[in-house]
Amino acid sequence: GENVEQHPSTLSVQEGDSAVIKCTYSDSASNYFPWYKQELGKGPQLIIDIRSNVGEKKDQRIAVTLNKTAKHFSLHITETQPEDSAVYFCAAILDGLTGGGNKLTFGTGTQLKVEL
Amino acid sequence: GAGVSQSPSNKVTEKGKDVELRCDPISGHTALYWYRQSLGQGLEFLIYFQGNSAPDKSGLPSDRFSAERTGGSVSTLTIQRTQQEDSAVYLCASSLDRTSGNTGELFFGEGSRLTVL
């Protein structure tokens, strides 16, 4: 089955700096890679995703890059703000877009702290 | 609100007791998932329901764990003879089917925090 590794486990940055979180996956057939943000006491929420037919996707201050050859993908947050402080999870899945969805395999999470 | 609702939000129980955790998915979502999040850990898949198909139970850690989804909507996760290592936050999520161009985005509830003394 799929295995997803995520680094670092904790990350502290100064407000305004950039933050990068990296993930690697094991199953070369995986083709859908979402990122979820979990605020304290809340459930995770999707913030951005990428499919294997593209190498990069941006949404305002966040971006995700994918290297299929190396089987790794990264989340980039620019101009970090205190409200970006949360736990971030990467995930991977072989998504055939037919029938039902299957279970996402999540990374172990990164605690991001944005300091004033 | 129309989000995923879980109850109870907190449950403290004694070792050996049975517990039931409930999940109300978003109306119209055909897929329902249970994940477990232990302190400082990632999201561990437990079980997945999709429509009328047989559930994927491959993540259940032992036969003390079971789950049902009645009428394609509400789901109950049952843990029998609870152990201290069962202490965790149990998260439920629902999604649309990935057919018809849906992304299959998971919408999570806020979780049920279980503490086994």
Image: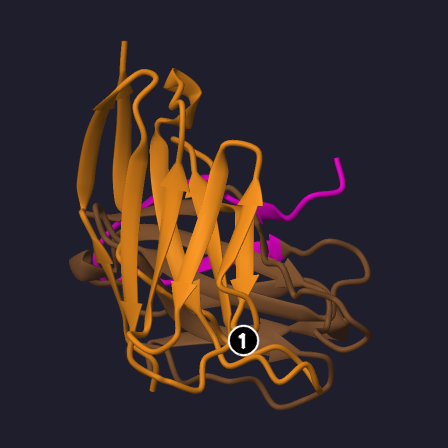
Chain colours: A orange, B brown
Q: Is residue A60 above or below residue A55?
A: above
Residue A4 counted in the magenta span: no
Q: Give left or right: position of A40 versus A33.
A: left
**Residue A33, position as x, y percentages in the image:** 48, 65
Quadrant containing the C terminus of chain A in the rendered view:
top left
Residue drawn at x 17%, y 57% is: B84
Residue B6 counted in the magenta span: yes
**Residue B93, position as x, y percentages in the image:** 57, 58
Q: Secondary structure at mark 1?
A: strand
The kind of residue on which mark 1 rests is: Tyr
Quadrant containing the N terminus of chain A in the rendered view:
bottom left
Q: Give left or right: position of A35 versus B39.
A: right
Q: Is residue A96 above or below residue B78?
A: below
Q: Find the residue positioned furthest to the bottom.
A: B54
Q: Give left or right: position of B51 versus A27.
A: right
Query: Does residue B11 appear in the picture of this structure?
Result: no
**Residue stretch rendered in magenta on the structure:** B1-23
**Residue A59, position as x, y percentages in the image:** 58, 40
Q: Is residue A31 above or below residue A44?
A: below
Residue drawn at x 34%, y 17% is: A16
